[in-house]
Image: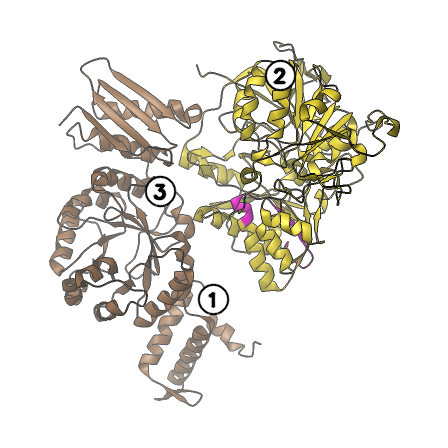
Amino acid sequence: MSKEVIMKLKKETMSELVKNEAGRWVPVEVNGQTQIPFKGVAAYKPRGKKFGPAVSSCADYPADGNKQVDSLRTALVKAGLRDGLCISTHHHFRNGDLLANQIFDIAKELGVKDLVWFPSASFPCHEHLIPYLEDGTIHHIEGSMNGPLGRFASEGKMKGVGILRSHGGRYQAVQDGEVKIDIAVIGAACADSFGNANGLYGSSATGLLGFALADSQYAEKVIVVTDNRVPFPCVPWQIQGNYVDFTVQVDKLGDPEKIISGTTRITKSPDRLYMAELTARFCEAAGIIKDGFSFQTGAGGTSLAVSEYFREIMQEKGIKARFARGGSNKYLVSMLEEGLIDYILDGQTFDLEGVRSMSENPSHVWTSPFTSYNYHGKGNFAGMVDVVILGATEIDLNFNANVVTHSDGYLLHGIGGWQNCLFSKTVILPVPLFRDRIPVIVDEVTTLCGPGELIDVVVTERGIAINPLRKDLLDAVKNSGLPVKTIQELKEMADQICGVPEKPVFDDQIIALVKWVDGTVLDVVRKVGEKP
Amino acid sequence: MGNTASAGNSGPKIRSDCRISLELTASGGMEINLSSKVISMYGNSIRQLVEDMLDYFGIKNVRVNLDDKGALPFVLMARLEAAVKQLVKTERVFLPEEKNNHQEPSSPDRFRFTRLYLPGNSPALMLNAGIHQPDGLILDLEDSVAQDKKYEARYLVRNALRSLDFMGAEKMVRINQLPGGLKDLEHIVPYGVDLILIPKCEGPEQVLAVEKEIKRIRKDARILLMPIIESALGIERAFDVAVASQDVVAMTIGLEDYTADLGVKRTPGAKESFYARSRLVNACKAAGIQAIDSVFSDVADMDGLKNAVQASRSLGFDGMGCIHPRQIKYIKEGFLPDKDEMEKAKKIIMAYEDAQKSGLGVVSLGTKMIDAPVVKRAERIIKLALGQGLLPKDWRNEQGSHHEA
């Protein structure tokens, strides 16, 4: 670790700063917890044992297995809801989630203060919680802060410091005891009164419950809430009732319209389609698309289009993929059903076709952040994927990328599985060179979320930049006729078109940490300041 | 002239554009009210630009309201100039940096399979149009611009000609119908336009009027012309139009207006325009220029488009207009020779050259006699294939190996 230390004006939650291995100044203590600065991509080795919650005894649970209580409020009270606890939820209901908001409505009614909310992700629907952040019901959020919550945090209004983690990093933090969950509330589309649960059946179906796995295993108290109670046994039990303290039945867990879209759509933008096509052509030229390969693309419009171009190339060549990692969606499902993919290893289903396929096709397999992403395990799936297609808000001359803040400094997105996917054999980021007037290729990213050494290729509508570390890729596409440029050339083009942007002005106050997949601190997000 | 003026677009769906309103005041200097989605990144440079431009045009006391949706500098400049010129009479122009000087000027016989129409007052659609690699990009001042936006569109098109990266596409502008369209010319002729489309052309006199005005504006300019025939009268006079000027390099047909003129519906089978299209092709070929077909207006119907391209090519057209980037690939593919055609053309040329060498009067390929027009057609196909990189320059050697699988 660098010994260079500077002192900064402190707020209650802040400490001295040190320069980490990525050259970013990060605090050694936040929210009263010691922090380890980032030491390099595979440099930090954890010691010690995994975290373990208290041992339970069947003597304390109903002999007939019926753990049903009359309401969420009762369950929370029985679970010991009080000041300062850490409450976890998961984001399978996405923007249709009603549960997280209800939990904090109850906390507010009970007068509980200083809670830590530990969601696997937040959505615009959670804007509802802003008054609770203002009145101290919630102290801070450890999890993605999207849209309105991110803006709130960026203005320095959250009491504590937010902690941003990847999906894999969230599992790691729970497993390692960095985050001790006091009460986990797991919303499940289907559950029995013992607490066995899945996300497959019912009006709030989400396909799987992988994001709640760590919560069930490591939380002190676990509450399963369902709007579709079935008699024991609820199978498959994606969440095992043996971890569960209380079960609750409610009318409605989520707003199905917003939970899952009936249709995920490929982008119609000709510019984005062109980028997707260029990405697929690159993969073909680089020899990545071969029989038995594997890939992961997100559910964004451009990513979906990339997998459609993959389909065309695979059909043309008469080959198939061994597996695709999801975010599943109707396009991936149709490739599975056409025999172009042997398996979908799914982390979350993005549309109803994904849910259907998972419930009826044994080759459509549900995964969790433990199997796919956890860096403190004995390997994970992310590294086995041949090529992954991701996005970014900014990419810099060293191929470092940002996914959480915009160039104006505001925190607006979570990390999701993005950091974890960087361990794939080839990481490709298709991004426009500029959005409106905002350059995407910049000299230095506002917030560092992914070290450039893990990012291999940047595809823009005006050219493809390959990380010089990947000589093999540079050689492979040398005579392909693809528009290969250097990242400097791309940046100059962006500046030519947009003009060189002014840097955002930041206040000293740190509003969030960006954790690396091993729990070390990669960067900080600061309060957005006023321009003089 | 009044005291207030505005230009540009704003609203929740508008991107890469801005709306500027100016109000001349008696005193108080410049008051700039700026709201911008990129204020933290470009706020200072936008203010500076506005001040510099107002200075340049000698405006000292003014209230400026600028609602910016991420407009690039050349767009901001065009909007501000369009607003200023409604308030101040001046010959001065404020030009963005020329970014297109690296591009080769066009030539009369370059390929024009695909030309993409871009509404001349919609910057968002222009910015990346070049990446789709049409042979030409048409900045349209005519039908795609609303009547009350015609004025400001000229400034945007002018600045786009200088600043937009055409990525090798021919820089085309469709002016307004004459005589109004003649006024468009001073905004485009000095600024790097390669080719001007003359809409609703009905006779050589219109071509000559455009040519004369171009020469008046810029003596040394060689700007190519493409008349658009859109009426029954125009069709009857197509050949005269085609030979009206040396600068007419292609002619095209606008079927929406043509069918309206005939009083018939435009149908997918296009029977109603068969005569007009054939006549246009014939006039073009007689004049030695390219014949370009009308646009296919259903952007979602790719199968329909493919059929239309086939029909168009078989009538003798050399290209087609595009109204959406998605159409470019299909149209280009349709107009390019396929493998069989290229193979056949190669064999014909080789046989012809062999016969020439050995002094044979009669050329034959297998049992078939080859006459001059067949050779001519084959040469055309080879030229096309070479021009598009479908054949290597030394294709004769490749052919020499003959026994490829």
Judging from the image, mark 3 belongs to the subunit labelled B
The quarter of the picture where residue B270 lies is: bottom left
Residue A319 position in % (x across, y down): 64, 62
The amino acid pointed to by label 3 is Leu
Query: Which residues lie in the magenta part?
Result: A288-304
C-alpha separation, residue under disc 1 versus residue under disc 3: 32 Å
C-alpha separation, residue under disc 2 versus residue under disc 1: 78 Å
The quarter of the picture where residue B347 lies is: bottom left
Secondary structure under the numbered disc 1 in the rendered image: loop
Q: Residues within 10 Å of mark 3 (few under 14, many from 20)?
A: many
Disc 3: which residue: B164
Query: Which residue is drawn at the image coordinates 50% and 50% (left, top)?
Result: A483
Judging from the image, mark 1 belongs to the subunit labelled B
Q: Are marks 1 and 3 in contact (CB under 8 Å)?
A: no
Query: Which residue is drawn at the image coordinates 71% and 16% (left, top)?
Result: A82
Disc 2: which residue: A109
Q: Nearer the viewer, residue B178 or B105?
A: B178
